[in-house]
Amino acid sequence: MRGNVMKRIFCLIAILLPLWSVAQVGTIWTKEYDGRCEAVAMMADGGFLIAGEIKHPQYFGNQNLLMRLDSNGDTLWTRTFGTVAEVDCSEVSDDYYGVTGRMTVSSAEIVRRAFANPDGSFVTLTDCYSENAERCKCLTTWNDVGASARRVPFCATGTNVIFDLNRTSNGQFVVLGSPDPYGTYGNRFFVMCVSLSGDTLNYWPYETTSDLHLHQMIKPCHDGGYVLAGSSPKSVVTRIDPQGNMLWTYQMEKSGGSIGDIAEAADDGFIVIGHMSRETVRKAAAVATKLDAEGALLWQRSYGWDSEYRSRTLDVLDNGSLLIAGSFNRYEYARMFVMCTTGSGDSLWTADVGRGELRAFIKTPDGGYLLVGSYAGARSFPQQKIVLARTTPPE
């Protein structure tokens, strides 16, 4: 009897040993700051730039926040700015907790992306309604101490809707947008290459005959082309070559999914991650999908149906394994996680990294990672916090 028990234990160890041999990430330090994070950039000196919002100390509403940190998370400088104006709350009293009459409020521009320059300066992409009332985006260059040096609005026609902007390997930018007011027609979109000063280098319009869908993000590829992804109502991925020719489009079969990120694999295929909501319960599962270089589905995996798992971003390791980062649960209960999978999407381990809804997942020079999240406490309590967690390299 004892021999049979020992034999079963050894068999169990043999099954679990491959999982135990892969070390999870460890947390080096965790720090909190006032505010809410929207975008993060890794700076040339190993420090970090946090861009987001913080409550105005005097007026109702938020103001923009720029915070420069060193590699240990210590604050080097902080800048706040925003638009303060007197508004009539009588007709929108619900937005101001029942206040009526006139009051002074502060508003902030929504930060979409942040990019670091080698000299310590940086660039942000924001919604900037001050230049144009119709969904204008602005590309702002800041010097190394957070002073605005140049601001380029992308809303010249008043009809184009800019969904996303990303940086290319040559330091220029690629823009994804729609020529339709408010972006109501998902089968029409454009890709535009622009310089830092806002000059148009290339403009490629597209019109498809597929079902309504909206591309919401664009990323450069290794060959100089681009990959686009989005969700509405079905998730969609489109590949474009360096000359602007559309190579293929893949559309998910089911509705209800949301794409968090997409990354190019070593075999020129693509890993798409996000989450899928259940129809019968208010929970979501993290989802990972692999497409080959021609846009054909290779595999799809889901994780965490027993909780509210939402994967937001990922990194493809040199050995082909995947690190998927996101959050489980939401609001005051949200916690950030890192999950490691094989190159075929089989889960190896999941590490709880700390409190917050994930906003960014950045690889650090030592091979570790920085996870940046935000939380707002109880839903009725407006205090906002930014959480940074620095991890060890995965082994």
Image (cartoon, rainbow, N blue to C red):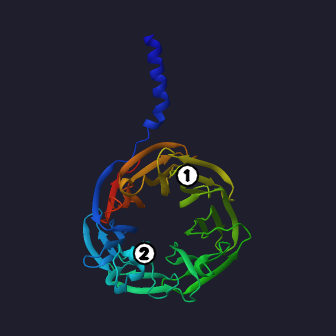
Q: CA distance from mark 1 to mark 2?
A: 27 Å
> Could you tell whether 275 is left or right of 379 in the image?
right
Give the quadrant of the N terminus.
top left
Q: Mark 2: few, some, or many residues within 10 Å (few <14, many ≥20)? A: some
What numbered label is drawn on residue 110? 2
> Could you tell whether 183 is left or right of 358 in the image?
right
Where residue 389 sits, quadrant-wise, is bottom left
Residue ID at (25%, 76%): 57
Where residue 365 sits, quadrant-wise, is bottom left
Above or below, 46 relative to 104 = above
In depth, the one of 201 and 6 nearer the eye is 6
Whole-percent x, y for residue 374 in the image: 36, 62
Secondary structure of the residue carrying numbered label 1:
strand
Give the residue type at disc 2: Ile
Residue 362 appears anywhere in the view: no
The residue at which mark 1 appears reads as 287
Where residue 182 sits, quadrant-wise, is bottom right
Q: Earlier in the sequence, mark 1 or mark 2?
A: 2
What numbered label is drawn on residue 101? none
Residue ID at (48%, 20%): 8
Above or below, 339 relative to 155 = above
